[in-house]
Image (cartoon, grey):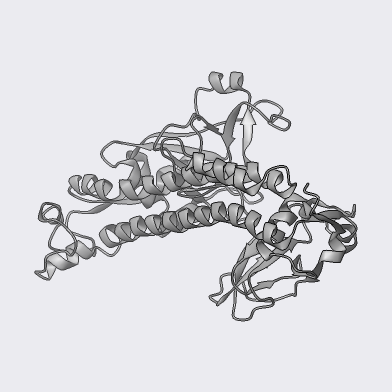
Amino acid sequence: MSEHWRPSTWGDEISLEYGKSIRGYQGAIGKYRVFGSNGPIGWTDQALASGPGIILGRKGAYRGVHFSREPFFVIDTAYYVKPKTDLDIRWLYYAIIHHKLGEIDDGSPIPSTTRAAVYIQDVAIPPVQEQREIAAVLGALDDKIELNRKTAATLEAMARALYRSWFVDFDPVHAKAEGRIPAHMPPETATLFPDRFGADGLPGGWEWRTFDSFYKTLETGKRPKGGVAGVSDGVPSVGAESIKRVGVFDYGKTKFVPRSFFEAMRKGKLADGDILIYKDGGKPGELRPAATYISEGFPFQEACINEHVFRIRLHKLLGQHFGFLALSSDHCMHQMRELATGVAQPGLNQAAMNALTFLMPSEPKILNAFSLYVQPLLDGCNEKAKESRTLAILRDTLLPRLMSGELRVGDARDLMAEVA
């Protein structure tokens, strides 16, 4: 720590303000983000705090720290942070992470962070200019990660929009039936689509078929006898809690299995292009399936799945890209929820998966053409995710050294230049 850093306590530097109860934020469309103890949870039309600002979880097993550039609302399971002194708000965000204020527990039956427990903690405050320089270094990494996230979300949205256009709204078929040339489509692709609809309302010759005729691999993994608690090294085991969407993976919840166990596994080892389905969980009588598509090196170079995840490989005719977008479509997700078995712990079994219906074009070459369009989009999502993973590792390496004064800002910039 530099001699210019002043000693203080958190109570002298910040005030933790209680959030407020609010209704109707889940699923709402509003102008301002609503935050809870674990992060963003909805939207509202009124803000409780101006941005930029910091949210600190107050109750629950996981009490995260979050940064909002815009005005925001905080519910009563979290605090928002008000500086009392001249502090750079983004430096303050990283300082709160570094000092693990969200992990301070008051010992009550419900894990909680109290203001009294935080305020007595010591903290060293660098001059404001140095705060800004530290925040600029760490913030540049987080800004790039956020840009990658937005880019990946756009790429995925483009892939889903194309799937909907071709296989839900049937835009190319409507165009040909009306004597028009399908928009944004080369002639050789347009000729593959029919120019009429059948009595069933489907493109001529297209038909619904069950999933059991489409896949060549549908399997789950497993865990060692006795579970994976305490296993901190080995091969990553992907569980349902880590699966989000393309290019989004929760590394913080990754479990591991011993390498010897992994090498003995006959099923459940991941391969490039696998489709993963979260098949279990949710409230009684309610399944919340999720799907993702993995590519080379994402989320790991080598990994397996546990018993709560399906690993799927489709016949080459369909292709993994079409299969992923079909399985994660509203149509298939609704079917999964309807076909789930069990009450206390709903889930999908193989029979339920076999019963899923897919709409199959009469001309298989349509699927080949579709894959040519969407493969770069889905792979681009995962490339952005891999880059963000590298940036996050660098950020997490630099953060404690910068926040403790062990590493100077100039040296940190040199390290960033080497990675870039």
Q: Position of residue 159 (x, y in %)?
A: 34, 55
Task: Write the residue at 62% across / 73% down.
Answer: 25
Q: Nearer the viewer, residue 140 or 3?
A: 3
Q: Nearer the viewer, residue 263 or 136?
A: 136
Instruction: Work out whether residue 76 can be spotted.
Output: yes
Q: Position of residue 200 (x, y in %)?
A: 24, 63
Quick check: 304 above or below 252?
above
Task: Write the residue at 54% across / 32% down.
Answer: 221
Quarter of the image for residue 155 reads bottom left
Quick check: 34 above or below 103?
below
Q: Position of residue 409 (x, y in %)?
A: 63, 49
Total label count? 0
Q: Is residue 385 left or right of residue 235?
A: left
Q: Position of residue 107 (x, y in %)?
A: 90, 52
Give the residue at the far bottom of this rendering: 46
Q: Is residue 316 left or right of residue 26?
A: left
Quarter of the image for residue 117 reads bottom right
Q: Nearer the viewer, residue 309 or 114?
A: 114
Q: Nearer the viewer, residue 194 or 229?
A: 229
Quick check: 245 above or below 26?
above
Task: Write the residue at 52% across / 52% down.
Answer: 145
Instruction: Work out whether residue 306 can be spotted.
Output: no
